[in-house]
Image: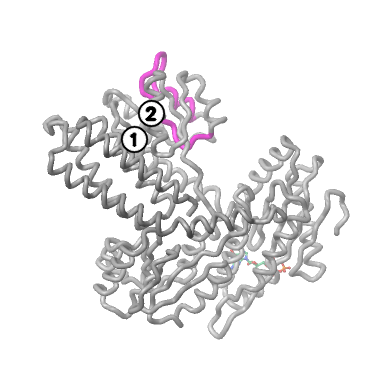
Amino acid sequence: MSCTPEDLQKRCQELAAKWQTCTRQTGLDSFVEFAVSVSSFTEFLEGHGLSGLHQSAHSLEQKVLSLMDQLMDPSGGGALSADASTLLNAQVQEFAGRVQAFVQGHSSHLTERRHARDATPDAEPVSTLELPKNIAFVTDTPTAWKDLVAQVGFFHVQVEMVGTAQTLAAAPEPAMVLVDAANRPLTAFVAQVQTLRGQFSASNIVGVNVGVDFESQQQALSAGCDACFATGTQHAAIMARIVKLCSNEEEPAYRVLVVEDSKTAGAMIRRTLSEAGIESLAITRPQDVLTALVSFQPDLVLMDMYMPGCTGVEVTRVIRQHAEFLSTPVVYLSGDSNVALQVDALRLGGDHFLTKPFNPVILNAVVKSKIDRYRTLRRTMLHDSLTGLLNHTTSKQQLQSAINAARLDGSTLCVAMVDIDHFKSVNDTYGHPMGDHVIRSLSWLLKQRVRKTDAVGRYGGEEFVVILPGALSEQAYTLLDRIRVDFSRIRHPVDDGWFSSNFSGGIAQWNADLDSEALLKRADEALYQAKRAGRNRLQVLQSGSQAK
Ligand SMILES: Nc1nc2c(ncn2[C@@H]2O[C@H](COP(=O)(O)OP(=O)(O)OP(=O)(O)O)[C@@H](O)[C@H]2O)c(=O)[nH]1
């Protein structure tokens, strides 16, 4: 979680202020502003993994949106009834109270974490010192989970195990609470999830060993589980969820290009988007669309349907001539429902129509859901399915971009090729699925230890590429050697015990004479030398050609 107590407090105060305005001015406009604020806060909480608060905000949002629907209905009278207002006021106060309690209970803890982060020594510029995360595990059969708990420990995640009859300490809140549903009635499991949901405002609550039937899963989710893993789920899947939650990955902000000839309408749309934390750029001339797409790289285009000289569909037709924008979602804003134009627009991959005047909450929800789908699609195209790292092609493109940036700003750059040692014998001895698990473990470790500006790709089967902009070879060596040692300490569980694995790595520092192919070749050459020198080691090729 990377939001501060101040962020939460500020948003909560904004929401309360909007509600106050609503109670003073009974019109629709102020209520819509309040609804946008509730909706945006709800998404903010979800985006920051504050699950319990998110669920409270979501139920408030549902209430507010249904009231907004009534207010917008011409027969609705345009104002809240006194009863509805009193009930809503109680719900707003209850929600605000829960946020305040959370902020007060956690500000000292979060502040400590911030100070620890600030104190990170400058001497380690290429390594993000991840602070330990804690998770709790509520189960009566701890031995069944000992391998998973040991694995999690290698990623600096601390686990507190408690029995189902015990109580967890209220603070600090665990990043995740795993609740075992095995060997007890569904009602008892559901009741415990509800209690935990009430106790923890931020923690992810995840059910494990939940029945595969609809009823068990539906009840677990309704009780407050953020996810549930059915009986028989591989521990690797649960492990992946834990590592993801405890990793330092953050989704970049949503980006929207608004093509709208009216400056006033464009500004209004941008304001609505920004309330929901969406970055945007507005252009008024359709002719500027290609330049804007290239420079702004939006996740979605909001397109006015009617502009002087051309329709939105014609603009989209031009956009679709460019391969890199073939799948960029386009949402049309239209004042009418011209069926012929809509059919044309859909054939060109138009994703949605919103009729003006648009409902801001719906606009933000449509934009975000389309962007989520688009990003998921891109992720599967650009990332490797086993590890979630960049795939071979994307890794090479990423390296080229990093070299371009280093050329521009005169900075340094290092590349490492990392290859698991004797991996064939891991597969031969323990089986291919265990081999996959080892590959995943290394990818998690690499991803967890590099900075957000670095990149890690799966270059081949058991070979990885690590791109470290701004790093000197000595720094790259220090970072990767620490990872090498930590990886060799991971105990991979097998029936009658465990085994460990190690890797070799080759590091090359970029200089202005090298293109991406040449740089990768040098890192590969260094890797070859590391293998020849006995494996489980790193080799550096300096910008000259001598191996160190
Ligand atoms: N489990 C699993 N194995 C893979 C995957 N991709 C490649 N491999 C295996 O990785 C092994 C690579 O073996 P080699 O290239 O001989 O290298 P090595 O045994 O690691 O030996 P050195 O690199 O010389 O230390 C082969 O057995 C491949 O089948 C994968 O996605 N999953």
Labels 1 and 2: the sequence-earlier one: 2
Give percent across and percent down for residue 208. Answer: 38, 71
Q: Is residue 370 left or right of residue 403?
A: left
- Residue 388 bears which disc, if any? none
Amino acid type at circle 2 is: Ile
For mark 2, what is the residue? 269
Give percent across and percent down for residue 313. Answer: 40, 25
Question: Dot 1, crowdedness within 10 Å: few (<14), some or many (≥20)?
Answer: some
For mark 1, what is the residue? 363
Give percent across and percent down for residue 299. Answer: 47, 37
Q: Quadrant of ligand 1?
A: bottom right
Say whether residue 342 is visible.
Answer: yes
Residue 440 appears in which quarter of the rendering? bottom right
User: Quadrant of the image for the C terminus?
Assistant: bottom right
Residue 301 sits inside the magenta stretch:
yes
The residue sitting at 57% across, 30% down in the picture is 295
Say whether residue 327 is visible.
Answer: no
Q: Which residues are magenta?
A: 297-320
Q: Is residue 530 left or right of residue 88?
A: right
Asked if labels 2 and 1 touch by Cβ distance under 8 angstroms, the answer is yes
Disc 1 secondary structure class: helix
The residue sitting at 20% across, 32% down in the picture is 26
Amino acid type at circle 1 is: Leu
> Can you say whether 533 is above or below 310 in the image?
below
Furthest-bottom residue in view? 496
The residue sitting at 78% across, 66% down in the picture is 531
Question: Dot 2, crowdedness within 10 Å: few (<14), some or many (≥20)?
Answer: many
> Can you say whether 391 is above or below 275 in the image?
below
